[in-house]
Amino acid sequence: MSALRDGIRRVNSAPGILIAVWALTVLVSLPLAAVLRGMLETSLGSSLAADTAAGGVNYEWMQQFVEQASGVGVTFRPTIIGFAAVLDNLSAFIDDTTRPVVIVGAAATYVAAWIFLAGGIIDRYARGRPTGTHGFFASCGVFFFRFLRLGLVQWLVYAFLFGSVHVWLFDRLYPQITHEVTVEWTAFLVRLTLYLVFGILVAAAALIFDYAKVRAVVEDRRSMLSAVNSALGFVQRNYAAAVGLFVANFILFAIVVGLYALVAPGAGRSGVSFWVGFAVSQLYILGRLWVKLVFWATETSLFQSRLAHAGWVSRAPVVWPDSPAAEAIIRAN
């Protein structure tokens, strides 16, 4: 698909954005990591459990630690190690599992930062050329409050999906369907089907809101309800291309996750092995963020190819004013 190739080209032409969002991810995670490190250091000290934990996973001590911990400490489980963390996050998402308040707070901060950066990122990809630091952050500021309003609409939609649809599918419909089922495999298939249905609904919502952001930036829309309505119309008119592009992007995401599953570090590493495992984990985060940016870039490319042309953006680019010296030269000539 041309939109996919063009979107990947746009993302790769602006590596600074990928590095910036990776740095943002690290900065949000560091305070939690520092707090958890302090809790572990206090719990282990110079005990024999410390030596066991350094050489592998001490499940008995870990269970005792979690039972006594609070806040971010309750997340210290075997499921945070290597690829298990990916599966744990996926399970928490599809099962709507509640996370500790401190994790929710960090996630909210992370989401707010992404809302701020979204306008500048999409604007850079839409123009297909460098916009400069001033132009980038000017776009971030212009669309921040617009995307906050869009975020409220998203929250209402996702609250309905996870608060009503999810409950109806898994707490009401699933028990009714499997009430008299005696084969465990059949019950598993039923639940897997419901996961698929729910996943399609969430993906459809995400697709619409992504194109709402794209239309808001490219067409300089101020009404977010209008942007959502226009995004819905665009997807309806270009259903095959939009869904096909979404599936292609999802396959990219699956490839990144699959590669990480093959090389994900395990427990009990120290010295050079530890730092190699750390580097592999950071590469996975970079890959996952790259895919997220590719989603936006390819959707922007598809929209421009259908309703405008590559590089077209309604709003004039923000350029840093010429220096007084340059202005004096212009006037002199």
Image (cartoon, rainbow, N blue to C red):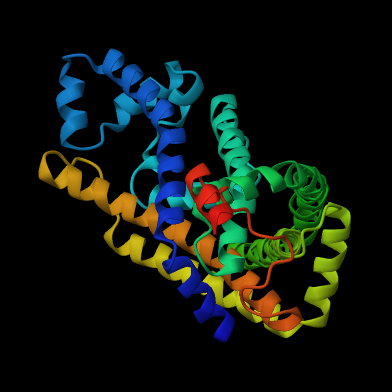
- Of residue 140 and residue 182, the one placed in the foreground of this image is 140
- Of residue 229 and residue 317, the one placed in the foreground of this image is 317
Residue 272 locus on image (x, y percent): 11, 44
Left or right: 166, with 32 as reference point: right
Find residue 308 and report its image quarter. Answer: bottom right
- Residue at 43% across, 68% down: 13
Residue 222 locus on image (x, y percent): 83, 52
- Which residue occupies the extreme front position in the image? 332
- Of residue 186 and residue 39, the one placed in the foreground of this image is 39
Q: Quadrant of the C terminus?
A: bottom right
Left or right: 68, with 104 as reference point: left
- Which residue occupies the extreme left position in the image? 271
Left or right: 89, with 122 as reference point: left
- Residue at 33% across, 50% down: 282
Residue 278 locus on image (x, y percent): 26, 46
- Residue at 52% across, 79% down: 6
Residue 88 vertical placement versus 288 (above, below): above
Residue 94 appears in the picture as rendered: no
Find residue 185 and report its image quarter. Answer: bottom right
- Residue at 74% across, 65% down: 314
Residue 315 appears in the picture as rendered: yes
In this rendering, the count of numbered labels is 0
